[in-house]
Every structure is written in C-alpha cells, then in structure tokens.
Image (cartoon, rainbow, N blue to C red):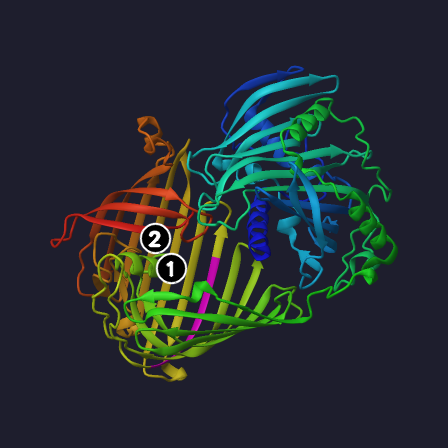
Amino acid sequence: MREAGLILRTAFALFTLGIVCPVSSAAEPIPPDSVPQAVGITQTIFVEGKEFTVREIVQRAMKGERTKLAGHVDVTYRISTHVAFVWPEKKTVETEVYRIYGDSTGYMRRVLLASQSEKFKKQNDAWALDETEQPDAPDYRIRDFDVSRFTRIPIYLENDQEYDFTLLDRTLEPDRVIFHVAFRPKSDFSELPRGDIYIDSNGFRVIHEVYEFTENPMPVFIKGIRRISVQWMRLVGGEWVPKQLAAELDLRRGAMWFAPSGISFSQIFEGYRFDLGYDARLFGERDDMPDLGKGIAAATADTTLSIAAPQLLSSLHAQDDAAYTPEVRITNHAFIDSTGARHDSLGVGGLTGSLYGNNLVLDFSPSLTDWDYNRVEGFVFGGEANYGRADQRARLSAFGGFATAPEEFRYRVDLRTELPATDRKAALVVSFRDRVEPFGSNRPALNSLRAFVGGADDQDYAHRLGGSARVVVTPTNDLSFDAGVEGTRESSVVTDEDFSLFGDMNQVNPAVEEGDEYAIVVGARVDTPHWLHARVTQRLAGGALGGDFRYNRTDITIRARGFVVGRQELALTLNGVATGDAPPFQQRADVGGLSTVRGYDRRTHLGNHSFASRLEYFVPYDVFAYTRIPLLDSSSIQVVPWADAGRVGEGDSQDWIRSVGIGLQRYLWPVDDAANLRLDFTFPLDNPESDFVVYLWFVALR
C-alpha cells in the first residue's frame, strides 16, 4: 500500500514541476519602453494617460518575473512539503523539510533535512492519529539543479505563443494598478494549464496565480483537479518570493482499488535570507565556487512582513485559502520548526545517511520499457538490475529477458559514466546486447501493444549481437552531440508467433543480409524552444574498420509544429535518408508505412535515397462538443486532417506515393511518444491494391 502511495506522489510531483518554478534569479530592471511584440492584442486600457494593451502587459511581465530578486546574488530559504493521501476511512500525511540555496548563475542546491509519515484513521467522523513512522530513507540528501530549474518563468509566459490572454479586470490602488489577466491555451485539446494571474503594474510582476486545466493531464489516473495555486509575497527589501503552493486532485479508483480517493498537496516557503554567500556548513561541500560579487544587502529579511504590497493581495490569499479543504493545511509545525533549528545548529553534520549521492546502490526493477511482443520473438519479459552511484553519475544496468517464441534468453548491458572535468555535460556510454531489434523506417509507438491486441505488428526485425562505445556531449538541454563506434553481427530471424487477441500476425519477416558490421556513428540533436526539433545521424561502415559491409548512411529528421495564424496549428515532418557504396538490405532507404506514408505497406519502396513528408492540421476547436450528443460531446476527441508523401531514389521505383486522411485522437497521458490514441481514416492515392485503410495507433504529444 505504501509503495502505491509513493508512486502516486512521484507522478504528482513530476506533474507539478512543469507548472511551478522556484525563486527567479537576479536580473537587471527592465527598460521602461522595452516591450517585444509577440502576444496578440485583444483589449486596450488606460493608466495615467499611458496606453497598455494585453500584449504589453504580458510582455512586460516576462521581464518583470526576472526582476523579483533584482540586485541580489544569492538566496537561501526553507521549503516544507505536505502531502495528504486520503482514503474513505484512513489517510497518510507525509511531511518533508528542505533547505535551499540558489544564486544568480542559476545554480541551486536542495538539502533534505528530515521527513515524517503520519497515519490516521477515522473515528466518529474525525481523524485520529494511528501511528507515526519514518519514511524510507532517501538514497542521498543533497541534490544540485541546473539553470533551467532555477530561472524558469511560469509556463504561460515561457510558452506564450501557445496561449491567448484576456484582460478581465483591473484594480486601482493609490500607487499601482493590479491587472487581472486570464490565460488559456489556443487549442481546446492542449495539455497545458489555463487559469488567472494578477500582475502588479509596479514592476509588472505576477503576484498571484490560479491554475485549471482544459484537458485533464492524466485522465487515465486522475479523475479531476480541483485547484492549483501559487501565492506570492513581498519582503521588506522589495523582493517578490513564493509564499505557498497548493493543489488538490481526485483519483480514479476503479482499476486502482488500492489508490487513495484524493491527494492534497502544499508547500510553504519561508526563512528567506539574501547575499550571505554559500555556507558549506549548512549545504555541504561544492566542487566549484564562482565569484558572484556582492549583492545589494547581506541582511536578514523578516518573511512575516509584506511591506508596501498591493492591498488586493491579502484578499486574494484569503480567497485562495478558503477554496481548499483542510487537508491542504500543514499541521506538523513542531516537527518542521525543530528540524530547522537542528539544521541551523548542526548543519549537514547533523544529517544521517548519504549526503552527496556518491554511495553505491543496487536496485532491481521489471524495466517494462524493455518488454516486447512481436511476431518474431513472441512475448519478451524479464527484469533489470542497476548498480552504481545513487546520483546516477556512474551506472551499470543489465536487463535479462526470456523470448517465448524461440525460447531463448535475451539481454542488454549498459555502462554510463560522466567524464571528469566536463561539468556533467559529457558522458561515456558503453553497451553490449543480444537482442532482436527492428530495422527500417517504421517505429510506431507502443508497437508491441498494437501487435498483441490487434495483430498490427508494423516493424521488421533482425537479430543483433554486439556492442558499442560512444561519447555523448550535452552543452544544453536543447543541444546534444554523440560520436562512437559499433560492432554487431547481424542475422535473420523467422516468424514464430502469430497470436493476437483480435486477428493474427502471420506476415512474413524479411531476411536480412547476414554478416559482421563495424561502423563509426556520429549524430547531433537540436531542439529550438517550442516549435522545431532536428536530428542528424551519419553512419560509416566497413573500409578500414573491416567487417562484411561497406557503406555510408545519413539520416535527417526535422519536425516543426506551431500556431501559424491565430489558433490554427500545423505540424510538418520531413525525413531524408541518403546511402552510398553498397548498403545491405536492412540499411537501405525506404518509404511506406505508419512512420512515413500511411496507407501503404511498410517498406513499400526501397532505394539508395528517400524523402518523406507529413503535414497535419490540428483543429483547435472541440467539434464534437457542439453536437450535444451524450458521451460524444464530452469525449474530448480532436480532429486532425493530414497528408503524407514520399519517394525513393535509385531504387525499385521513382514514383511518388501519396495519401490523405483524417484522424480522430484522444489525449491519454503525458507520455512523449504515445500521448494520444489516434484513429486514422486513410485514403492512399497511388495504391492500386487498396483505396481505404484504417489505423488505430498511438501518436506523440508534440
């Protein structure tokens, strides 16, 4: 039962991380007339003769958010986290206390001071304490975070091009105006939150946030989200800092009978101190200590005071507190205060267990992502063992599984370790495997599930025995490079399994050209914020490396998605492959199938070169909601018209193959490659064997 609660808490923590940001880093005050042009104008207001549009308000807020700690170089504070898992007749309350250090470079260190779990049972319609226990000890207490976690602005400002903003109201105060602005995703089917924000014209900072969701972010597990909000407060020095984060949600208990009916979550931020420098006694030793200079004040701030704050703020906080159930409120103040006092006195020396994550741990997991079902191997299931540092800077993992069709053992061994003196931006990855793996362009998400349920195995397979070594360099989250060598023995596999719940999988698996392959592989990935993703890979096999194959292959994939006019959203995918010398059958370029041109068999055409394009239009309006047909009007099904086209060069055909269609998709969960369940009605334009094909498959979130 406790494990289920931990799983739910982890899922919820990940869910909230995308919404709420820590304290913003220091920045220069914004120039009074420096206003970029991005958000569409919807309304005009007047303040003391100065005209402000919603566009200007939001754009100024983007800069104002980065000035909430303007002039300071570092900050320390305490976070108390409270999570209540509530069942009809019992509840568990878990409390954790953290001390945080952050500086203007974006560096942040979080130290877990203590945690406690309290179990209650219902007696006479009231909660009675049943027992108090210590939760499972963490692998380590001190964790470092990079700039993206410390300087992140709210999601509606970071992704402002995906939102429409509307001015709802303004409140005039003696020295300021408070703008009440609503933000809503442009698409009715967006997984992003919507809500209300209040912006103070004095600095254009967000001072209160309330979140809702147009689309339930996890409808499979979450029944509904009652409320999420962030309260801000102004300190005596003029700094704006978080005061409270709170949220409540209801869970679906049908299939998860063991799950609680609801979760109430809150975090209290307090004890802010500025410009005191890094204290190793409180936060532990660091590898590097940058020179931050001096802040405007190395003084203690009384976080109980809110000096010259907007008058509206107190009423907003009162309304917010009243909107939650009592389960949100932190009651274990004695534990929190004593924990803070102990840390002030003893520092990290008073903490037990591993501090830095350099301790070695061994753990086991089923590793469900390695499980598979296909027409060649049947059911592949097993487990994984992991051994290495608790912070995963050096990790050895091994998966072993049994394939039911050939009745053979399959395995994979991976070693990943960070390279020294690279600031965690470079790693060496060594792997060895004995697995059956797909080849060709088709890589539909959750292919094994489609194969088991409907017999729709849309991949071809080869057996690979061998290993690789590569260096991965990640300068930023949006840019990465990798280079290494691979050596494998490739062999054909035959069809051994044809069972599925509906239909069968009796398609023939093609034979491959067998032999040893030795190759150099280099690649790069670029993700520009919000709309463009590109990946290029170059593979050079044979020659001086030896082996049975000599060829080169270049793969380029570009995906672009964004709002082109108003709420109209388009997605364009381009795939190009070029090969040279004498590529084996399994490495030749191809088109046809779910991943390139729908309505045609996988690998319909083969050649030395290929090009495929896909254009999709995501209708932003909930068309079925207007039908007023029961169930259908609340189904949240999005309409997606689309078109595919592709051809090969120097191959078995020079003709283009094309298809058009319309998709109906339903959002399921925030899984990048399989977030939506899609039903595609496909009309191939150049296929004499079929003029209509229907697919049921999973497509990516974005």
In front of the other: 94 or 101: 94
Question: For mark 1, does the 10 Å Cα neighbourhood hold few (<14), some (14 to 19), or many (20 or more) residues?
Answer: some
In front of the other: 334 or 498: 334
User: Along the horizontal axis of the image, is 684 left or right of 406?
Assistant: left
Which stretch appears magenta? 516-525
Q: Position of residue 501 (x, y in %)?
A: 27, 58
Element marked by disc 2: strand
- Please name the residue that numbered disc 1 is placed on: 556
User: Along the horizontal axis of the image, is 107 left or right of 279?
Assistant: left
User: Along the horizontal axis of the image, is 610 left or right of 130?
Assistant: left
- Please name the residue that numbered disc 2 is placed on: 574
Instruction: Residue 522: say if magenta.
Output: yes
Which badge, 2 or 1, is on the more N-terminal residue? 1
Looking at the image, residue 614 lies above or below residue 3: above
Element marked by disc 1: strand
Quarter holding the N terminus is bottom right
Q: Quadrant of residue 323?
A: top right
